[in-house]
Image (cartoon, helix red, strand yellow):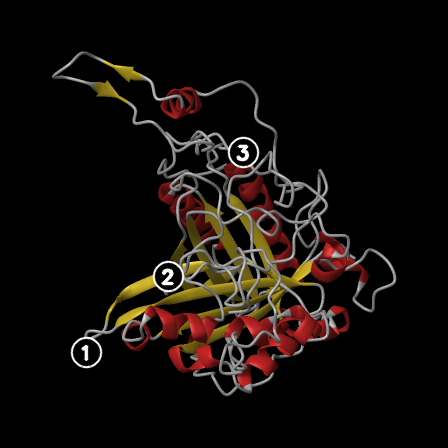
Amino acid sequence: MPDQSIPEAGTVEAPPGEAVSENAAPREGISRRRLLGTAGATGLVLGAAGGAVGYASAPAGATPLTSLGEDMAMFHGKHQPGITEGLQARGHLVAFDLAAGASRKEAAALLRRWSTTAQRLMAGEAAAQDDTEVARDAGPSSLTITFGFGNSFFSRTGLEKQRPASLDPLPDFSSDHLDKARSNGDLWVQIGANDALVAFHALRTIQKDAGSAAKVRWQMNGFNRTPGATSHKMTARNLMGQLDGTRNPKPTESDFDKRIFVPASGSTDPAWMANGSYAVVRRIRMLLDDWEKLSTGAQENVIGRRKSNGAALSGGGETTAMDLEKTDAKGALVVPINAHARIARPDQNGGAAMLRRPFSYHDGIAADGTPDAGLLFVCWQADPLRGFVTVQRKLDRGDALSTYIRHEASGLFAVPGGAAEGEYVGQRLLEG
């Protein structure tokens, strides 16, 4: 789990250094929820002695809560939604395999249906046909739906010559304990929203839209902290209790697009991948019983950062540059040589970086009492060989965190650029 940070979900107007999605729609006016949040921030109290009723005073400088339901991402854009937006409270990852005998024609029809559905649902509208009304009372709730193609898709549709070299299978890693039935797939869909029913509605509608053209290969459910649950925007925590994502690349950085998106020209990728990205998906189980036996200090040495605020062990705050050479009174490195944050740093990996956008998961308790819980790791990069593979190889050779995690499923998907008005996702591949 490389040490890089991401902005909080639902951000439209962000402070300097935080992401503003190209797919985010501006909001107008003031909602009832936002008005109440503002009242809370000013410490409004209603009622008399013996029966005080009202809103507790928020911490100084806190951002008032806003309506989650009205936040909306746009389907059409330069890039697909669900990449640069912040973390959402609920997510579903699902892979499909094309049905036997399904051709390029059926695949194109399916992507056309899925794109129409994504556009409607992301706008807070009902599905075009047979809507289940699960999300009837909700707004868009920052819903994003993202589509990608797996390596096997191209041979199934006779498009081998259009398969990107970057989609070659990932190498084996020593921490892998992969379940093939829950890995890879012809097609991949990422669904995220800030309301669980909105996310489920999208999942169910996408599955129904597949019809006889494709069947579900695997599906995983995830979650994050709900936006607004903390008094201020902050880096998310994972199920180990650590701030997870402190050094994520940010859209404000000059080389962000170069690292994350395939350029429209000058690339070795096929033309249909212009403005697209590559998603690596890993189901990483956290061995929480073992992890939680460690003292806080031991956990911090494994990560290389303070559990309380994400600051490097070398000092400062969360964003203070890590001093890799700093030693203690005994001459030992303050940030251990095998600390996760040290090994995963871009400057320790030839500048390799990826945009991490994960979900936590919990799939119940095993018979022996251990939780089946961890991270649905999703990372985005223009080149997975230079991004994920470079960093994971380094982690594989001595990351202290590897003792406490296990990679149980994996996938790599080519995610084309966003669809223009009147287009469907993947049209330039399927009709090119």
Q: Quadrant of the C terminus?
A: bottom right
Q: Indicate the position of residue 343 as horizontal and vertical percent values.
A: 58, 76
The residue that label 1 is drawn on is 368
The residue under the point 68% across, 60% down is: 277
Question: Which quarter of the picture shows residue 355?
Answer: bottom right
Between 318 and 79, the one nearer to me in the picture: 318
Residue type at numbered disc 1 = Asp
Between 207 and 337, the one nearer to me in the picture: 337
- Are discs 2 and 1 less than 8 Å apart at CB? no
Is 366 above or below relative to 110? below
Tally of marks: 3
Q: Indicate the position of residue 223 as horizontal and vertical percent values.
A: 39, 53
Label 2: state its secondary structure.
Answer: loop
Between disc 2 and disc 1, the foreground one is 2
Question: Which quarter of the picture shows residue 229?
Answer: top left
Label 1: state its secondary structure.
Answer: loop
Residue 391 vs residue 177: left or right? right
The numbered mark at residue 123 is 3
The residue that label 2 is drawn on is 241
Residue 424 vs residue 317: left or right? right
